[in-house]
Amino acid sequence: MVVDRRNVIIQAIVLEIEGREDITLDVSTPDSRKKLSEHPVKIKEGATYQMKIVFRVRFDVITGLKYLEEKKRRGILIEKSDTLMGSYAPVLEGQPDFEVTFGGEEAPSGMGVFGRYDVTSSFADEKNNYLDVQWAYEVTEDW
């Protein structure tokens, strides 16, 4: 029997997009993460959205948890960010997962923005890197 010793388990990245239902990217298993970059999320140009991270802390207190993101277009880095998520105590079985929502962003708009954007999302503190996940979105004229 394999025992899961991970202290921080990132369950999902949720895109809350104005004008449509939330899109949940399941990042809880290796199989679900593998599928993410193969199926880009469609986002309408200029749409306003925000990201929500759903996660669980299990054994020890986590201090200084950060979300790191790199966005690339055609292999060229276009944006890099580092957002402090905070410090968290473990939750007991049956308690709800933590949710952290980041401020709103606007999808690119204008000439030359249509197409695929590759994203690398990482979750880490000073001691550990908990997860690196590759996913993608595609900016389109319409939904």
Image: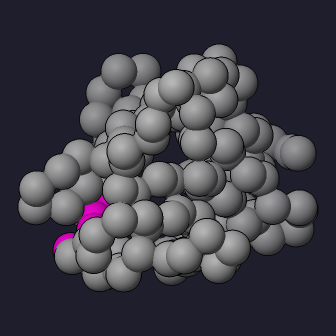
Q: Evaluate whether residue 65 shows in this view.
A: yes
The residue drawn where x is 25% and y is 55% is: 124
Residue 63: percent from left, percent from top: 21, 76
- Front one among 23 and 77: 23
The residue drawn where x is 48% and y is 28% is: 2
The residue drawn where x is 75% and y is 64% is: 17
- Front one among 21 and 112: 21
Q: Is residue 82 above or below residue 134?
A: below
The span picked out in magenta is 64-68
Residue 18: percent from left, percent from top: 79, 70
Residue 106: quarter of image: bottom right
Residue 53: quarter of image: bottom right
Q: Going by the image, does 53 lie left or right of 66?
A: right
Is 41 within the magenta? no
Q: Is residue 98 above or below residue 116?
A: below
Q: Is residue 25 above or below residue 118?
A: below
- Front one among 117 and 123: 123
The residue drawn where x is 19% and y is 61% is: 125
